[in-house]
Image (tube, helix red, strand yellow):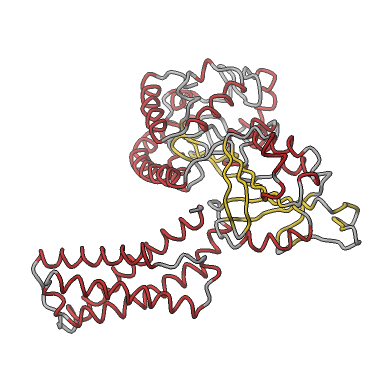
Amino acid sequence: MNQQKRFQSNTEFIINLISLFLAHTLSIVIFGVIIKRITPYPKNDTIEYIFVLLISAIIVFLYFSVRINFTKRDRTFEFTSTLKNCLLTYGLFGAMLILTKNPIIDSRYLFLSSFIFYIFFSLIGRYVFKHYMIKKISKSKFATRVGVISTYDRACEFIPKLKEDWTNNVTALALIDADFNESGFVLKNGKSVFEINEVPVVANIESLIGWIRTASLDEIYINVESTDMLPNANELIEELEDMGITVNINIPALEKIVSQSKYNNLNCVVENDYPIAKFAPTVISPGKLAFKRLVDIIGGIVGTILSLPIILIVAIPLKLESSGPLIFKQQRVGKNGRIFNIYKLRSMYEDAEERKKVLQEQNQMDGHMFKMDNDPRITKVGKFIRKTSIDELPQFWNVLKGDMSLVGTRPPTIDEFEKYESHHKRRLSMKPGITGKWQVSGRSNIKNFEDVVKLDCEYIDEWSPILDIQILIKTVGVVLTHKGAE
């Protein structure tokens, strides 16, 4: 099951559970509290009632739920499928109550009213998700940012199907059969083309590599008749691998690529009625990513609560020593080129960024990262909060927002990212983190940026929940001993 189907399936189940809860709550309030037609039942009977209801909902969901994409369902289909789901759930529920001889089955007011309310809330839940949440998801920072390489005719057919997967945000299109002149991209028949299905045309065969190197993408879809239409196709695939971007190619165009690609993972799937081969340098299951996000949310909440009193204590000497805001906000580059604002306690003087330009010649880091001992831009209090990593505490808010993870790679500044070569970008194929392998590997002793990239790529290739836990434990030790924190 692909990511969209899995997410849709889980969402429908959650809608069902919420609808059941609201239906019974409303029934009890109306007929138990207000009208007083429902009398309280013994605790054991109530627990059995709830258990049987949940079992019925799970069985119906697993064996009878609709698997058709939300975007392909019309109102009539949605109504009939929802009604069928509710009838099956309550039919099975009623039968199981009779078999278990649960006395609550005698409460017709509760049973019938909750059934009617269940239908109502199920329809409302699906409507809200279909007409509001799907649009929000496809345009949010959590959507998969997709680029397409194709010809005009194939793109006209393929892009609408690609957009049916509402976890995709199709951001740009490269037309390999278009020329470019002063008026824009032009087809062989002289027709100008600026967009297809609201997806802007941003490149042709000549500007393809340049676009890929500067675009912020999670995945690329290549839909062509043959890879012979793409000069140096293998070099293109390898460049995308270096950048950590997943590549999807329609299977008829695959023969040469499959035999020569250096990709570690190849998976043939059918997406949106198209047989596709998916190449990815590293594959992490949606379930594991969901678990990582859950840990981030819990850790972000706990970290934010514990950080507040520390931040309040440090705020006084920080403000007394130098002018400027307490919280320093700076644009950084996150997963696959996404720009976000990172938050830190200000440890430098206000003119730090201007002075950085003058200090570039004293950079002790070999590569696209700035670092120097005894940095004159850092305040006295700033040295303390950096040594103890207190300056990083506001980043728990970044974790809660979803811009960062508890464990990941260091997010570069925009000017650092602009100097990246293709293979450097692979370190951003996962969310950046508050801590990471570089931070717990003696970062003060690492002077070469390529070594940082190597550590980050090792983390991505070897990632597991256990590895994150190990790094978090090591981070505590590093913070307490002040090792590597400069």
Vertical side of 191 occupied by 389: above or below = above
Of 242 and 385, the residue lying toward us? 242
Residue 480 image-quadrant placement: top left
The image position of residue 427, as x and y in percent, is: 58, 33
Q: Which residue is drawn at 74% across and 57% down?
A: 200
The image position of residue 47, as x and y in percent, is: 15, 63
Of 128 and 90, the residue lying toward us? 90
The image position of residue 291, as x and y in percent, is: 40, 44
Vertical side of 309 occupied by 363: above or below = above
Q: Which residue is drawn at 54% across and 61% down?
A: 136
Vertical side of 69 occupied by 328: above or below = above
Instruction: Give the farthest residue toward the left.
Output: 42
Vertical side of 46 occupied by 465: above or below = above
Of 271 and 361, the residue lying toward us? 271
The image position of residue 172, as x and y in percent, is: 71, 53
Instruction: Give the farthest residue toward the top.
Output: 445
Residue 446 image-quadrant placement: top right
Of 410 and 308, the residue lying toward us? 410
Q: Is residue 93 shown left or right of residue 269?
A: left
Q: Is residue 51 shown left or right of residue 388?
A: left
Q: Is residue 134 shown left or right of residue 242?
A: left
